[in-house]
Amino acid sequence: MTSVSTAAAFVAVDWGTSSFRGWLMSAGGEAIAESRGSEGMLHCVPDGFASVLHHHLARLGVSDGMPVLICGMAGARQGWREAPYVKTPTRLDTLHEGAIRIDAPGDVRILPGIAQARADRPDVMRGEETQLLGVTEPDFTGLVCIPGTHSKWISIEQGHVVEFSTYMTGELFAVISQHSILAHGVETGAPPPVDSAPFREGLAAALAAPSGLSASLFRLRAAQLLDFEERSGGAARLSGLLVGTEIADVRHQYGAQALRLIGAGQLGRLYEAALKTQGFGVSMVDAEEASRLGLAKAAMNIWGAQF
Amino acid sequence: MTSVSTAAAFVAVDWGTSSFRGWLMSAGGEAIAESRGSEGMLHCVPDGFASVLHHHLARLGVSDGMPVLICGMAGARQGWREAPYVKTPTRLDTLHEGAIRIDAPGDVRILPGIAQARADRPDVMRGEETQLLGVTEPDFTGLVCIPGTHSKWISIEQGHVVEFSTYMTGELFAVISQHSILAHGVETGAPPPVDSAPFREGLAAALAAPSGLSASLFRLRAAQLLDFEERSGGAARLSGLLVGTEIADVRHQYGAQALRLIGAGQLGRLYEAALKTQGFGVSMVDAEEASRLGLAKAAMNIWGAQF
């Protein structure tokens, strides 16, 4: 016989642009089973969401009555059904109040994203708000960094998201390395190891001259043409330049301080190492764990009484 | 009967990556006839250079004995024949000494580019050095800006190129507007008019926060998603952000000062206006005129005695 704490209580889903991750969860917030796939939002548009969810629920062995809580791009305007952004400043532990309910069998809800609806600093997130909820206490004050294609830096005060900025660091790496003149000088692949010399040099160059990114990019190619550098170091140097420019701007805005880093794999370790060199104190939380924790907290707020 | 000063003396060619521009020139440096086409270096590789030149010489009505002086990418390693870079610091009025002679009927030469072979600031130019020669006096001291796909900023002292930097401004505009998430928010086309409000706002934002380009790029898209801005202003704003980041970095390095701007069309006028708002004194020279003047000066240095 299964104990109460490990009995299945709900399904948590992180439904991104290009991936689906579902977990069967206990009322205590522990993952009992997992089902993941590549059926992200782009795969499901316009009307594949219900059947993809049904497929994964079946794989998890879940009956129709089980509540499902979703975060991420499934709630975007171009997703399954829009879960309108809540606006900054907003408490993370009231996120669930903005969840929308899908017109489907069972109780299926999607958490909202957060918008910074300020003309001077417009910004949006969808999915990261749930990770933030996952890794912060109700009275948390501090800075959180979520590196990635669109890196997010979030300033939180007493459990409220008060301000955030998105840096297109990962996407700039992709478009510059694939479509610019640097395509000749950059071999794309996994992020560089943290002890990569060209990464560290690129990082240092960007931190020393953060307004000079566009000139540093050309120098990367010129250094190869003039035989100062090997093509093999190009990707690590480009990564260092872009991450360094991001960190320089954040340091300029907030100063070096203790922060929580919601990271995954090699990229998370790279940011951790880079931030530490600049005097930031870093405590890292795994990105997937953060999503699951946030979904569990929000689920408790929605259905806790009935678990 | 033709007077001496307007008799054809040589052919000047600006042979770039994607275009060919040839002029029949008098000994006095005046263009008598012109022939242009789209047969740039990329079109001619690997062995079409001789026949393309022959075609344009025929269009100019030139006999085989007429000297030809070429600048630009035809002299690159991947061009017709490499005219190895001369190294900074270098006098502009000795550029012709680095010209290489093509193994072809007649006297056909290609001017060299200039390399900054410094590990800390590696950089290269090919074509712009001839424009610099064209627009500067032998004892010129000052800053020259050549905006474009790869904007060049050149510091000249007493007729020597002492230092230069290349900004990938135009290329970043192209890859970001075509291949990033901003492709949804930017309609590409001609550069914006100088009085464009989104251009000026982007310029001001970049000058106020020059390390924040990667965040400003995402804000451009977020502002549209949150209905603060129209998609129609996206290209002008992106242009303002990129040009502003370039100017901020130059201002940081050299300070606002009088400069010569080698520009063409709408883009030249845009830089002129942007630079003036930041306190630079700008005297503009047409880019094509600059190339022709530089080729004429170098030709006089090579063949002047026989004209």
Image (cartoon, coloured by chain):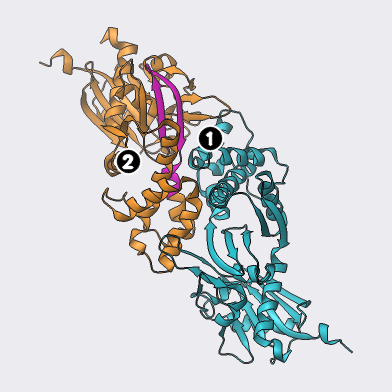
Chain colours: A cyan, B orange
Give the percent coordinates (x, y) of residue B175: 46, 50
Do circles 1 and 2 both sit on a common chain? no
The residue depicted at 24 percent of the width and 22 percent of the height is B25
Relative to residue B42, is residue A177 drawn left or right? right
Q: Which mark is residue B88?
A: none
The residue depicted at 45 percent of the width and 68 percent of the height is A117
Indicate the amino acid at tag 1: Arg
The residue depicted at 69 percent of the width and 64 percent of the height is A287
User: Which quarter of the figure has residue B263?
Assistant: top left
The secondary structure that most of the magenta stretch takes on is: strand
- Quadrant for the C terminus of chain A in the image: bottom right
Asked whether residue B67 is in view, the answer is no
* The magenta segment: B151-173
- Quadrant for the N terminus of chain A in the image: bottom right
Give the percent coordinates (x, y) of residue A135: 69, 67
Looking at the image, is A50 positioned above or below residue B60? below
Q: Which mark is residue A219?
A: 1
User: Which quarter of the figure has residue B23?
Assistant: top left
Looking at the image, is B196 positioned above or below residue A75? above
For disc 2, the marked residue is B271
Instruction: Reply yes or no: does residue B167 show up in magenta.
Output: yes
Using the image as rendered, state which of residue B208 and residue B60 is in the foreground.
B208
